[in-house]
Image (tube, coloured by chain):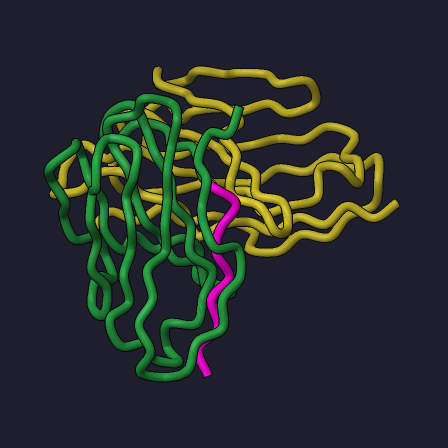
Chain colours: A green, B yellow
Amino acid sequence: NAGVTQTPKFQVLKTGQSMTLQCAQDMNHNSMYWYRQDPGMGLRLIYYSASEGTTDKGEVPNGYNVSRLNKREFSLRLESAAPSQTSVYFCASSYRVNQPQHFGDGTRLSIL
Amino acid sequence: TQLLEQSPQFLSIQEGENLTVYCNSSSVFSSLQWYRQEPGEGPVLLVTVVTGGEVKKLKRLTFQFGDARKDSSLHITAAQPGDTGLYLCAGEATSGTYKYIFGTGTRLKVLA
């Protein structure tokens, strides 16, 4: 009963390195999301995919790219990591867009 | 931009006390959810309220949706240390490009 699985759980990068965060869901959900959570800032939407084949920008998309690989998988890529991207990243999914979401346990990313 | 403001931001209480957390907006929401997030984990959905004035109970937690569907409250009776966590409200806004908005969060600590 996995739900939403994120990998890796922890990562340390140097400024300028690139990295892809992986997310997969096994609930047959159509919509998937990437958030970042910073201390005192709550959840901020980076990108979302309302359905397979579509992606749209959220509140804070700069410095990130996404790929909806198939219905199950939605990846987030940092092309050239910056210290300001140090955060906890959460992937979520829902049956349809704007519906309650199921979250993964997060990826804790530090950029030095 | 539609906002969901939560109050208080932080709350530290003794075991056995009662508390209420508020989620307010100037905009109307089609539905509203409450999530709880424990340290090191992703948010977990607690409840969805849809109808203005609706009240839902989940053991010692009581959730209410405002009559005008612009606000909500979460009341915890006889709080326990296991209630400790970050409480987030989120709602489906009635307008905007992307309609699912998260609140700013209330961090609750219940002391034994």
Q: Residue furthest right?
A: B112
Residue depicted at 23% across the width and 35% down the height: B93
Residue B14 sits in quarter = top right
Q: Nearer the viewer, residue B46 or A47?
A: A47
- Image: A6 above or below B65: below
Residue depicted at 70% across the width and 22% down the height: B60
- From the top left corner, tell me how far across and down residue A85 is, in percent: 37, 72
- Residue A105 lies in the magenta-colored region: yes
Residue A61 sits in quarter = bottom left
Residue depicted at 36% across the width and 50% down the height: A22
Residue depicted at 20% across the width and 60% down the height: A65
- Image: B12 above or below B82: below
- From the top left corner, tell me how far across and down residue B6 is, in percent: 47, 48
Residue A19 sits in quarter = bottom left
Residue B106 relative to residue A59: left or right: right
- Image: A28 above or below B44: above
Where, quadrant-wise, is the C terminus of chain B in this rendering? top right
Residue B43 relative to residue A56: left or right: right
Residue B106 relative to residue B49: left or right: right
- Residue B98 lies in the magenta-colored region: no
- From the top left corner, tell me how far across and down residue A95 is, in percent: 29, 23
Instruction: Write down the region rendered in magenta.
Output: A104-112
